[in-house]
Image (cartoon, rainbow, N blue to C red):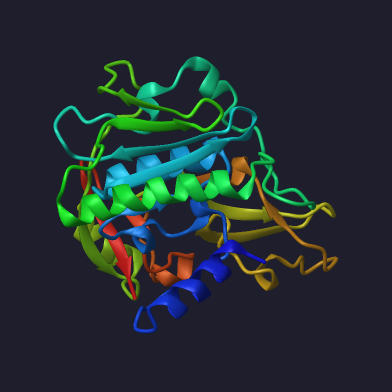
Amino acid sequence: HPKAIIQAERASRIQPGLQVSSILDAVENVPPGRLRGDVILGCLDSKYARQHVNQLAWRLGVPWIDAGVAANGLLARVNVYLPGAANACCLECAWSERDYQTLDVPHPCDDGDGAPTNAPAYLGSLAASLQAAECDKLLRGSRASINREILVDLATHQLYETDYRRNPQCRFDHQTWTVEPLDARLSVAEALELAGGALQVEGKSFSTRLRCGCGELKPVFCLTGRLSDAERICPNCGEKMHPTGFDSVARLAKPMSQTLRGIGLMPGDLLMAGGNRCLEVTA
């Protein structure tokens, strides 16, 4: 069963008054504003997803706590990051060139028992307990292990604590954005006027045309990946059409009458307006 649904059900049983929202999607597809809160807990399966959450946490200025396991050494670890703090390190501050070279290596879930790491359940439970302890300390304002990695080696019953510092050679810029609301019902032209210039969604582009294998071309303007299946049907042969990199633009720069919602933007999407200024699309 999807973890998002199971965890939402369990949280609601523990505390019926909670408002819990489960989102079944890759984290990089979720509108960033949906993840803004007091703290982000990362229980992720891939390096790419961790990088995305790390950068998102810094952009939003939200503390985040990452946990992980290594089954072959019976290791459980937790790292605490505090974006915006002076000289605070991020996930990528500890990365080597090798980490970036293996960034896109997939880690699909197994069809059998356990996670792709083949880690025993007790190892994941230990990592989760360490993470919950650091989250509790962070929310209470007590001494959380910020800029540190806590590693437990169950094979030797050893505990290690490693301090990390900001890496001046880190590829990430560690910038935190100033976020302002932007009504999704506004037209692109009105949004551009409010922004005082071009707008863009970091790491994403806008599709301007769809192509079909039969040769049919269809003009569109939508955030890539946000077109519905019905909108992607070829009017000539009925097959699904696809956007290409040749038919995309990185920024909103031309005034248009279409609303932000009409070009695929959703509540929680963040539009960069230059410098550290950012506009969050609202309902």
Q: Residue at x 38, y 40 (%)?
A: 54
- Extreme residue toward the bottom, this view: 16
Asked if residue 137 lies left or right of residue 110, the reply is left
Q: Residue at x 21, y 56 (%)?
A: 139
Q: In the rendering, at what x and y percent does residue 202 appear? A: 39, 45
Foreground of the two, 136 or 147: 136
Asked if residue 174 lies left or right of residue 203, the reply is left
Q: In the rendering, at what x and y percent does residue 195 appear? A: 22, 55
- Where on the picture, by quarter, is residue 190? bottom left
Q: Quadrant of the N terminus?
A: bottom right
- Where on the picture, by quarter, is residue 155? top right
Foreground of the two, 68 or 20: 68
Q: Quadrant of the C terminus?
A: bottom left
- Where on the picture, by quarter, is residue 59? top left
Q: Residue at x 79, y 52 (%)?
A: 111
Instruction: Tell me: residue 153, above or below residue 58.
Output: above
